[in-house]
Image (cartoon, rainbow, N blue to C red):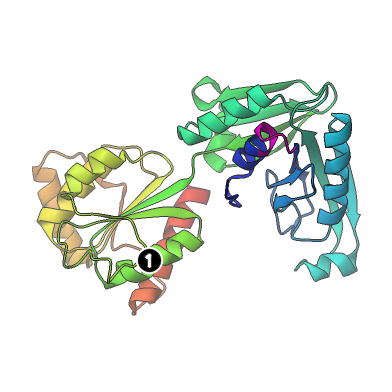
């Protein structure tokens, strides 16, 4: 298989099933300005192959050696590294500190069972939010799905926050972020590649094939369905952002109504305050409530004085990030 940096559990499972051996290294805690947050992962094979990162480079070598040892003896271990000021500066930090890394072989008496890893990978494929919990003393492990979570754990899901809790470590596996862009306009040409760099899986919706062409959007996923049909097929969820860009009510409005009937975390609509006021009148007439309409971010994007398509795309991504991370 071709390993991807966002497919670390999947890579570990594949390597294990292929008989190559695998160990997962996961950041448990870090210093304040760490390049990799808690929950970041690295997978190592029995042959020393690696994918992912736990520190940006300063402790990877030692982690790989410990992972190879874990594969050999079947035992998990919790590693603590003190990072000097000099090493911290080399990976872009202002100062040194401490990083704790959990190393777990796949299989073995003290590792994560291949069956549990398979269940985790299946949940990720189904876009089902899941928490992987491991007791750092007893090495007992559990998978907890978001619909089974208590309020504290639901807060972790909402904040996308992995980390320690007492003697336990909780790794949050939320579905990947998606972005649905309605309108194959010039702003979309900048927004889609920027969104991908920011970690989103973008899809473009526009029934006008001359606009949504491979020539104008090379390599992008393009749906030429009407927006309401496309939204019904895409099923936006709480990890999905929606942006409408056409200025055409017959295209934007059905997408907006579908988005407001979903759990999407963000809905942004291009248009001036006057255009948006007319939009609100149409949506009220269509029966949408004030609570629903309050979810719309319009004019779309943070007010940073953006003028060009690329600058507008930056403002949209900034606003999406603010809503996602700070609500």
The answer, for residue 302, to whether it is visible in the render is no
Q: Is residue 116 left or right of residue 240?
A: right
Q: In which image quadrant can residue 237 be found? A: top left
Q: Position of residue 53 (x, y in %)?
A: 71, 53
Tell me, yes or no, whether the highlighted magenta stretch contains residue 145: no
Position of 28 relative to 76 (above/below): below
Query: Is residue 224 at least partly visible in the picture?
Result: yes
As drawn, 237 above or below 57: above
Residue 208 appears left or right of 140 = left
The residue wearing badge 1 is 191
In the rendered image, residue 144, in percent from the top left (x then y), is placed at 59, 23
Q: What crowding class fits label 1: few (fewer than 14 Cα within 10 Å), some (14-19), or many (20 or more)?
A: many
| Percent of width and height locating residue 28 | 76, 41
Number of numbered discs present?
A: 1
Residue placed most toward the observer, 164 or 61: 61
Residue at x-position 63% and y-position 42%: 11
Residue 312 is drawn in which quadrant?
bottom left
- On the picture, is 245 further left or further right than 150? left
Q: Which residue extends farthest bottom?
A: 308
For residue 70, what is the image quadrant? top right
Which residue shows up at 24% across the image and 64% down it?
A: 184
Magenta span includes 17: yes
Classify residue 104 as left or right of residue 282.
right
Above or below — where is 144 with respect to 247?
above
**Residue at the spot x=28%, y=66% of the render?**
214
> Which secondary structure, mark 1?
helix
What span is in magenta?
15-20
**Residue 297 image position (x, y, % from top left):** 32, 55
Above-or-below relation of 274 to 262: below
């Amino acid at each position: 298989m071709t390993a991807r940096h966002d497919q670390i559990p999947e890579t570990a499972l594949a390597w294990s099933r292929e008989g190559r051996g695998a160990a997962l290294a996961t950041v448990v805690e870090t210093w304040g300005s760490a390049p990799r947050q808690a929950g970041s992962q690295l997978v190592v094979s029995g042959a020393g192959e690696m994918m992912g990162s736990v520190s940006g480079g300063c402790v990877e070598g030692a982690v790989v050696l410990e992972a190879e040892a874990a594969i050999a003896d079947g035992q998990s271990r919790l590693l603590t590294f003190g990072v000097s000021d000099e090493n911290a500066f080399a990976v872009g930090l202002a100062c040194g500190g401490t990083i704790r890394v959990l190393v777990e072989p796949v299989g073995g008496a003290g590792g994560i069972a291949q069956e549990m890893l398979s269940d985790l990978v299946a949940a990720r494929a189904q876009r089902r939010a899941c928490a992987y919990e491991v007791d750092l003393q007893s090495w007992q492990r559990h998978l907890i799905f978001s619909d089974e979570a208590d309020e504290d754990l639901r807060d972790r899901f909402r904040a996308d926050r992995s980390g320690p809790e007492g003697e336990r470590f909780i790794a949050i596996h939320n579905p990947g972020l998606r972005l649905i862009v309605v309108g194959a306009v010039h702003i979309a040409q900048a927004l889609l590649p920027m969104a991908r760099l920011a970690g989103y899986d973008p899809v473009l919706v526009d029934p006008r094939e001359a606009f949504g062409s491979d020539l104008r959007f090379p390599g992008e996923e393009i749906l030429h369905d009407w927006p309401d049909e496309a939204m019904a097929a895409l099923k936006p969820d709480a990890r999905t952002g929606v942006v409408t860009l056409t200025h055409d009510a017959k295209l934007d409005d059905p997408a907006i109504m579908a988005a407001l009937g979903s759990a999407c975390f963000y809905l942004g609509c291009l248009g001036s305050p006057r255009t948006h006021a007319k939009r609100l009148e149409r949506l009220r007439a269509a029966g949408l409530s004030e609570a629903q309409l309050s979810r719309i971010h319009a004019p779309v994007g943070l007010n940073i004085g953006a003028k060009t398509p690329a600058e507008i795309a930056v403002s949209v991504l900034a606003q999406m990030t603010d809503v996602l991370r700070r609500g």
